[in-house]
Image (cartoon, rainbow, N blue to C red):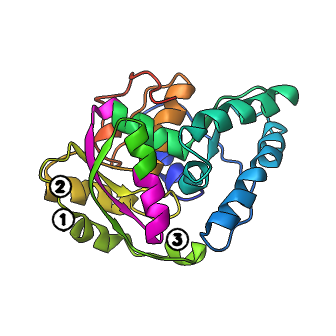
Amino acid sequence: METEVPAILRAREAIAPERFTFHSSRMRMTHVTAEQLKAMDADSDRCAVELSDARVDVLGYACLVAIMSMGLGYHRVSQDRLHTRTADNGAPAPVVTSAGALVGGLHTLGAKKVALVAPYMRPLTRTVVDYLTHEGIEVLDHTSLEIPGNLDVAAHDPAGLPAIAERLDHADADAVVLSACVQMPSLSAIEEAQQLLGKPVVSAAACTVHQMLRALGLPAVAPGAGHLLSGAYAEAPLAGQ
């Protein structure tokens, strides 16, 4: 969230007039386990209040699996609750979760069948698959990189992701999720993966930017971030909320 989202928006600044500042508040999590994810989500209320002190225009909740592990459809509950926290602090702002953004981004693309890459241990990746299935998106194939450490997820080399995605059974997929996690970098590999696979490729981070821009009422377009941000869906309404 603190690297790829700003990078995408900085690339947008080269072709559009809007300028952005970035503010962050952290929920603690060192190992990607169900217990730490639950504790992390409980801390999100504090973060929303702290960020609303800065009178930000939109909030992005970074951890996709923290939301998905809290129950089917939970991104809507989280977004509503955190928006209420900002309103109670006198600075109402829309909230976009990366979980809801991935759902929304795939629906915007019209992708009903996908293949995905996730850094999580297998049980957590299963949680992601079940969550997407509940939202009307069939996961035809997926792979778990099984990286338990949060910092190790961030250090994973994105250069190998296109080849990992190519090994998935993606022939009938409408789109491929190159990184179902905003912590695992993939931005530098999205365009290469699209060319290799011959179909739209998204990431949790790219979907988050798309939904944040639409929540701001801005055209959701940015170069080098995949088909969703190519301009074809620049005026698409918020989806999957």
Label 3 secondary element: helix
Q: Residues within 10 Å of mark 3 (few under 14, many from 20)?
A: some
Q: Which residue is mark 3?
A: 154
Circles 1 and 2 in contact, beta carbons < 8 Å: yes
In front of the other: 18 or 125: 125
Query: Most extreme residue toward the right, as rendered?
Result: 89
Q: Is 175 positioned to the left or the right of 51 in the image?
A: left
In front: mark 1 or mark 2?
2
Q: Which residue is mark 2?
A: 170
Please state the horizontal and vertical placement of residue 201, each as a whole percent of the image.
28, 49
Q: Residues within 10 Å of mark 2 (few under 14, many from 20)?
A: many
In front of the other: 91 or 109: 109
Label 1 secondary element: helix
Magenta stretch: includes residue 111: yes
Q: Is residue 27 above or below residue 77?
A: below
In front: mark 2 or mark 3?
2
**Label 3 is placed on what type of residue?**
Ala
Magenta stretch: includes residue 110: yes
Segment colored magenta: 108-129
